[in-house]
Image (cartoon, rainbow, N blue to C red):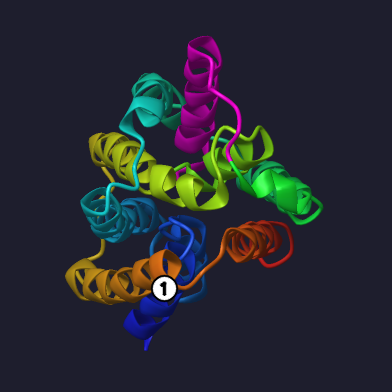
Amino acid sequence: MLTACFAIVSLLYSTVGQAGGTAFLALMAFASFPPNEMRPTALLLNIVAATYSTWLFNRGSHIDWAKLNPLLIASLPTTLVGASIVLAENIYNAVTGIVLLVAAVFLIIGRSNRDASDRTTPLWAAISTGAGVGFISGLTGVGGGVFLAPVLVRTRWASPKQTAALSAPFIVGNSAVGLVGALHAGQAPSSQTWLYALGALAGAMIGTMIGLRWLSQATTRYILAAVLGFAGLQLVVFR
């Protein structure tokens, strides 16, 4: 049953290039996982789901690597820095949840003409954005895609569909760095992670295909807003 839940989460999130880290953590908390297993397990599931999405997006030439590289490279060292800071759980839940809810609102109220990418990303802005998102990613213990996506859409540096393609490899890189930090801190994934990973992979395979073939720019934006809103609510209300 838990594997099926991971698959459903992965399917929904992967339609917009996300991996589902926040929802994975919520499911594990509900299932009373040991705290030292939750973060590495969620990060491994992130890597599995986002790696498949990255492969599929890249095969279809949907990833703008020139735009992604400064964002990703700048994020990796700050992810390590953020991962070294441990927030009190109530502060972490409140701050992260509010940020995600605000991002969801901004996406919902965006006009349809914002669904197209019409701005060039300045190098300094890409580096500072990547570094900031990376730090928050490490601090919160998720892949970072949920923080990167609303920035890209609202600044019009990428369309919703381009944002999905950029988010997946960003999540892979930041989740890998976060996993190294978690393992170094003595945390270890659940012994059943291989089974949960199969569910996450199955969900990602279906969800990414749905996102690529059938979702319009506007639909992608609204689904992304729903994903961010759900993630924010589960942190503020249900944790």
* Residue at far bottom of view: 1
Residue at image location 57% in from the left, 32% down from the top: 157
Query: Which x, y percent locates residue 205?
Result: 29, 71
Q: Which residue type carries mark 1?
A: Ile
Residue at image location 26% in from the left, 69% down from the top: 201
Q: Is residue 147 left or right of residue 40?
A: right
Q: Is residue 158 left or right of residue 111?
A: left
Name the magenta segment's main secondary structure. Answer: helix
Q: Is residue 239 visible?
A: no
Image vertical order of residue 129 relative to residue 3, above or below: above
Image vertical order of residue 224 relative to residue 68, above or below: below
Which residues are the magenta region?
Answer: 117-142
Q: Is residue 132 left or right of residue 109?
A: left
Query: Which x, y percent locates residue 225?
Result: 66, 58
Residue at image location 77% in from the left, 47% down from the top: 106
The residue tagged with tag 1: helix, strand or loop?
helix
Q: Which residue is mark 1?
A: 210
Image vertical order of residue 49 relative to residue 179, above or below: below
Query: Which x, y percent locates residue 6?
Result: 38, 74
Label 1 Cα crowd, 10 Å radius (few <14 / some 14-19 / many 20+): some
Q: Is residue 42 magenta?
A: no
* Front residue (pair 165, 28): 165
The quadrant of the image that shows the C terminus is bottom right
Q: Is residue 133 magenta?
A: yes
Residue at image location 21% in from the left, 53% down from the top: 59
